[in-house]
Amino acid sequence: MSEVKSYRIAVTGSNGQLGKELARIAGRYAGNQFYFLSRETFPLEDPEKMKAWLDLHPLDFFINSAAYTAVDKAESEIEKAFRVNAVAPGLLATLLAERKTPLIHISTDYVFDGNSSSPLLENAGTNPVNQYGASKLEGERLVLKNNPFSQVIRTSWLFSSYGNNFVKTMMRLMKEKETIQVVQDQKGSPTYAGDLAEAIMKMLLSDRFIPGIYHYSNEGETDWFTFALEIKKLTGSPCLVLPIPASAYPTPARRPAYSLMDKSKIKKDYGLIIPDWKASLAVCIELLKKQGV
């Protein structure tokens, strides 16, 4: 029998959706040592404090899921968005490179402009249509430049039983209102943060750390309106859900009209079997029902 390896893994963004899901499943990987880092423990804007912590805690992997995710606010808080999403990850990548520690950095489908009509490969041209996407793209660039042991995982439309997300917002609105309107002309794929957490752990424990960019979302293509209809069906809500074009719901930040990502690379390199978004949505909604949401 081959020896089971034990790894030391640090996670930033521990209060976010992915961080919470990684914490939830950590018990299933009990042979490994996890550090779930708060902003106080590991301030990404403070290189000296980060360096001091890393000197005291040798690591095998570092997962950076910390991010500025207020897409609309980023249009007016450009400097803050770039500080959190680009400067800080670039700094972290440099510190980890000095220690030859692999970095897994989470990015977004919003690095694309939405003009494609077929699923986007990792090497597809990037051209963000909002400041959030631009800040995340610059973060990708700095991470890959500053640390050759880096993986960037782009994901999309993240939802879970934790934090704020589309699923929880829709469930609340469907309880509060008789009718809601949801944008129909933006296509992509939802991602259950629990599935992404499992995928990351499978990749880390595979003994095949392959630097570069990967795409991960749940299988299947949808739009926000159809996503909302599935939430309505699974919750048994009587709320009337109506489709509208994005032009009827103006927001400070533009969204890409099409951001479906091709996942063949991550499936080929790591043998991942990715669940369909509807199946994972059903799992998440059952969890939320148990929580009384």
Image (spheres, helix red, strand yellow):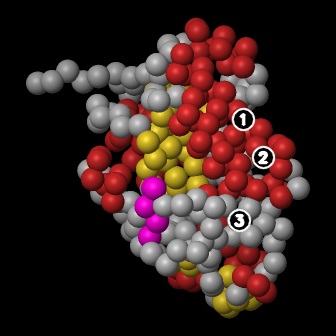
Residues in magenta, as a range:
119-123
Residue beneath disc 3? 129
Amino acid under disc 3 = Val
Q: Relative to 253, is 32 on the left or the right?
A: left
Quadrant for residue 19, please give it.
Answer: top right
Residue beneath disc 1? 87
Specify the farthest residue to the right: 76
Q: Is residue 120 magenta?
A: yes
* Res. 181 visible in picture: yes
Q: Relative to 130, is 226 on the left or the right?
A: left
User: First in sequence: mark 1 or mark 2?
Assistant: 2
| Rendered location of residue 257, percent (x, y) | 62, 76
Secondary structure under the numbered disc 1 in the rendered image = helix
Secondary structure under the numbered disc 2 in the rendered image = helix
Of 268 and 15, nearer the camera is 268
Residue beneath disc 2? 81
| Magenta region, main secondary structure | loop
Amino acid under disc 1 = Val
